[in-house]
């Protein structure tokens, strides 16, 4: 088997597994409700429908992630650059995720003086959602997640840091986590769902927007720092004449 065939086989087996698990669960709960409707109480029914909703969301996320990967690879992905304020965009994203992870605490630490950045707003939202959700997924309930914006060491970039108090990532896995379909085995990754596509997409989108991502981690938690270009004359020109390829 050549390398491409091996990759294709791995891909099909990962995707089939990722699709089968939620589909089996959706079918199982729907069948139980249909066959036992009269004996189930309202609380049980509600619980089952919630599981069906969660598992459907998992499928939608997987399909959206796979479409993103496909677009990224075929260079069909169009970036619409706009000048935006990172703080204004991040705030509602944190509010939504806070709602989903009610047992974590979320702290916002915004520097109100940061300059405007030059980004594609949809892609920026996708990046922030991935990183903040990961911070919650890979840390225990009751811990804190901080989202901090600030100037960076370079005047050309704004810094956004997402810090969790979670399980951490070992230095030898730093590169691996950004690879397609790669997940690091540990008790929390076994418990939480994921396709291993999020960070691959996140990094590719950041690079395409001429930004960068740094990672610091220990057993006490992890910080992902993303650097995104400020809106200035030079970056305006990049916007007009196309961005660097990832
Ligand atoms: P997914 O979350 O779908 O598994 P990602 O590409 O977003 O995929 O992440 C890849 C892997 O990196 C995760 O499976 C997890 O092992 C690790 N990881 C990501 N974010 C964190 C984090 N904040 N803390 C610890 N591990 C993380």
Image: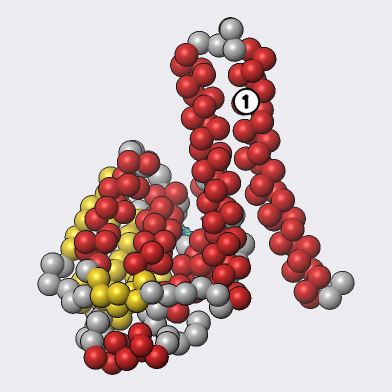
**Location of residue 33 by image quarter:** top right
| Residue 25 rendering spot, x and y as whole percentages | 64, 33
Q: Is residue 172 visible?
A: no
Residue for badge 1: 30
- Picture residue at 24% right of the left edge, 91% below the top: 233
Question: Which quadrant does the N terminus fall into?
Answer: bottom right
Q: Is residue 67 above or below residue 228?
A: above
Query: Front-most of 1 and 55?
Result: 55
| Residue 26 rendering spot, x and y as whole percentages | 62, 33
Query: Front-most of 147 and 49?
Result: 49
**Location of residue 104 by image quarter:** top left
**Location of residue 149 by image quarter:** bottom left
Query: Front-most of 99 and 81?
Result: 81
Neighbourhood count class around disc 1 (C-alpha, 10 Å): few under 14, some 14–19, many 20 upward? some
Q: Is residue 33 above or below residue 145?
A: above
- Picture residue at 70% right of the left edge, 48% below the top: 17
- Mark 1 vs ligand 1: CB under 8 Å? no
* Residue that protrudes farthest toward the right in the picture: 1
- Picture residue at 52% right of the left edge, 27% below the top: 49
| Residue 55 rendering spot, x and y as whole percentages | 56, 39
**Mark 1 falls on what kind of element?**
helix
Compared across the picture, whether 123 is left or right of 204 comes to: left
- Picture residue at 49% right of the left edge, 24% below the top: 47
């Amino acid at each position: 088997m050549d390398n491409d065939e091996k990759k294709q086989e791995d891909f099909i087996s990962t995707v089939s597994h990722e699709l089968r698990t939620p589909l089996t669960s959706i079918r199982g709960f729907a069948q139980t409700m249909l066959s036992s409707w009269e004996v189930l109480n309202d609380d049980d029914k509600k619980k089952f429908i919630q599981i069906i909703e969660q598992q459907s969301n998992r499928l939608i996320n997987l399909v959206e992630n796979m479409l993103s990967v496909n677009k990224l690879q075929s260079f069909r992905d169009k970036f619409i650059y706009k000048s935006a304020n990172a703080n204004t965009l991040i705030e509602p994203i944190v509010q939504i995720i806070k709602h989903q992870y009610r047992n974590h605490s979320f702290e916002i630490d915004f520097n109100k003086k940061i300059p405007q950045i030059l980004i594609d707003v949809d892609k920026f939202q996708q990046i922030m959602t991935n990183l903040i959700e990961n911070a919650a997924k890979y840390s225990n309930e009751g811990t804190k997640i901080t989202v901090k914006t600030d100037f960076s060491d370079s005047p050309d970039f704004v810094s956004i840091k997402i810090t969790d108090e979670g399980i951490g990532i070992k230095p030898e896995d730093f590169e691996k986590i950004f690879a397609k379909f790669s997940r690091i085995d540990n008790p929390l990754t076994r418990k939480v769902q994921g396709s291993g596509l999020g960070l691959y997409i996140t990094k590719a989108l950041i690079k395409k927007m001429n930004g960068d991502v740094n990672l610091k981690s220990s057993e006490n938690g992890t910080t992902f720092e993303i650097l995104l270009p400020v809106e200035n004359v030079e970056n305006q020109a990049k916007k007009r004449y196309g961005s660097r390829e990832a």
